[in-house]
Image (spheres, rainbow, N blue to C red):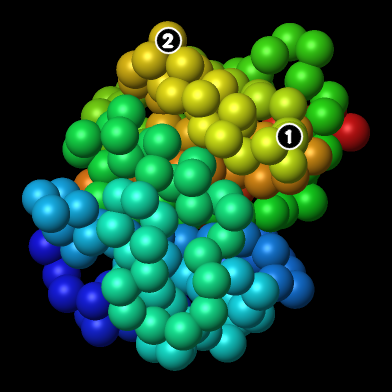
Amino acid sequence: MAGFQELCRQLSLAGYEFYRRGWVLGTSGNFSALISRDPFRLCITASGNDKGALDETNFLEIDDNDEVLQGFGRPSAETLLHLAIYRMRPDASAILHTHSVWGTILSDYFFESGAIEIEGYEMLKGLSEVTTHEHRETVPIVENSQDYIALSHVIENVLRENPKIHGIYLRRHGLYTWGKNVTEARRHVEIFEFLFEVLGRTLK
């Protein structure tokens, strides 16, 4: 796995590109990547920073108890959600959380159905282990909450019940997706955002 400085660089580039595309406006969103699993060490964005202007001073190194080992600032309360995903997805080494217009709209529109479901699009093949456009991708929608301990348990249950999904949406909030590295997680964000916009415009 890459070291802290290199992961800061990779996540900063992701932040710049996502900001440019309107997926992490203001101080929204948070990003993380594993430094190591044993001992557990995580590089994660500090709370309250503009994701379009990140540098290494905007990241923290933390352990699995959310204790800061390196860097200045405080971890987001949503760090607990990152930790839950890493616990349930041993193949994940990076998690990216974005806030896009289309995804937010769809998370509300499909909330009663429980998930955003997408099938039949060639772009689905950009998701890891998807080999055909006939694939149906399910993105479960979870009600947003400020009780992040309870929310982390909900996310763990969703991941336990849906072992092959690539993302989860917090209603009226944002997307969580992951990958085996930052590059793959970035690709998943791009694929989902393309498909969210296509689906949203189709519904409109």
| Viewer-side residue, 97 vs 35 | 35
* Picture disc at residue 144: 1
Against 83, residue 149 (above or below) is: above
Residue that lies at the very extreme toward the right in this rendered image: 204
Residue at image location 73% in from the left, 41% down from the top: 146
Earlier residue among tags 2 and 1: 1
| Three-letter residue code for mark 1 | Asn
Q: How many marks?
A: 2
Residue at image location 67% in from the left, 45% down from the top: 174
* Picture disc at residue 104: none
In the image, is 78 to the left or to the right of 57? right
Residue 33 locus on image (x, y percent): 31, 60
Against 120, residue 51 (above or below) is: below
| Viewer-side residue, 157 vs 77 | 77
Residue 97 locus on image (x, y percent): 55, 53
Residue 192 locus on image (x, y percent): 54, 42
User: Label 1: how many residues lie within 10 Å, few (<14), some (14-19) or many (20+)?
Assistant: some
| Viewer-side residue, 139 vs 73 | 73
CA distance separating discs 2 and 1: 19 Å
Residue 38 locus on image (x, y percent): 10, 50
In the image, is 47 to the left or to the right of 64? right
Q: Quadrant of the N terminus?
A: bottom left
| Viewer-side residue, 12 vs 79 | 79
Residue under pointer 2: 161
In the image, is 37 to the left or to the right of 193? left
| Three-letter residue code for mark 2 | Glu
Q: At numbered mark 1, what does the secondary structure look like: helix, strand or loop? A: loop
Q: Quadrant of the C terminus?
A: top right
User: Label 2: how many residues lie within 10 Å, few (<14), some (14-19) or many (20+)?
Assistant: few
Residue at image location 32% in from the left, 79% down from the top: 70
Residue at image location 50% in from the left, 42% down from the top: 81
